[in-house]
Amino acid sequence: MSDSQDQIMKSVAHRLAVVYTGLFTTCENLPIPIALPDGGDAADIKAVVARVSQIAEEQPVPEEQQAQLFTAAVMWLAAADLYSILKMDFLEARADAALGILLIARDAVTALGEWLIEMD
């Protein structure tokens, strides 16, 4: 992998971690807290995040906040899947897609986090 590709992969990995940290913290602070793994196997983390998307509508919060939780989870999951593909078959457009998807996930988790702070 070229230096440019290495840098892009590091950027995607870093942003995945940052958004996951936001999702982790937000899930801990939901009315019905959801515990996400603090590290461990990538497949286990993906499975738990997928489960978050499935149970988002069970949270006793308004529909908009349920949608934000769902969006954050599925967009993070999509970006994580793209990152896995990138490790095997790097394509800059795919990396750009992962970064764009992570922006959507970040915005959703940020909006939900801000709402939770306001409700506190």
Image: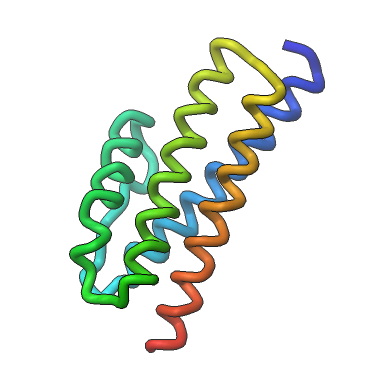
Q: Up-down: is 30 above or below 97? A: below
Q: Position of residue 68 (x, y in %)?
A: 42, 63
> In which quadrant is the N terminus drawn?
top right
- Pick the residue in front: 33 or 69: 69
62 relative to 116 in the view: left or right: left
Task: Specify how the rendered protein is coloured.
Answer: rainbow
Q: Up-down: is 77 above or below 4? A: below
105 relative to 100 in the view: left or right: left
Q: Up-down: is 11 above or below 82? A: below
Q: Position of residue 35 (x, y in %)?
A: 27, 56
Residue at 50% over, 61% down: 108
Residue at 45% over, 28% down: 81
Residue at 31% over, 77% down: 62
- Pick the residue in front: 26 or 54: 54
> Which image quadrant for residue 78?
top left
Q: Residue furthest front?
A: 63
> In which quadrant is the C terminus drawn?
bottom left
- Pick the residue in front: 41 or 26: 26
Q: Position of residue 70 (x, y in %)?
A: 35, 55
Q: Up-down: is 38 above or below 69? A: above
> Which image quadrant for residue 97?
top right
| Number of numbered tags placed on the structure image | 0
Residue at 62% over, 41% down: 14
Q: Position of residue 43 (x, y in %)?
A: 32, 29
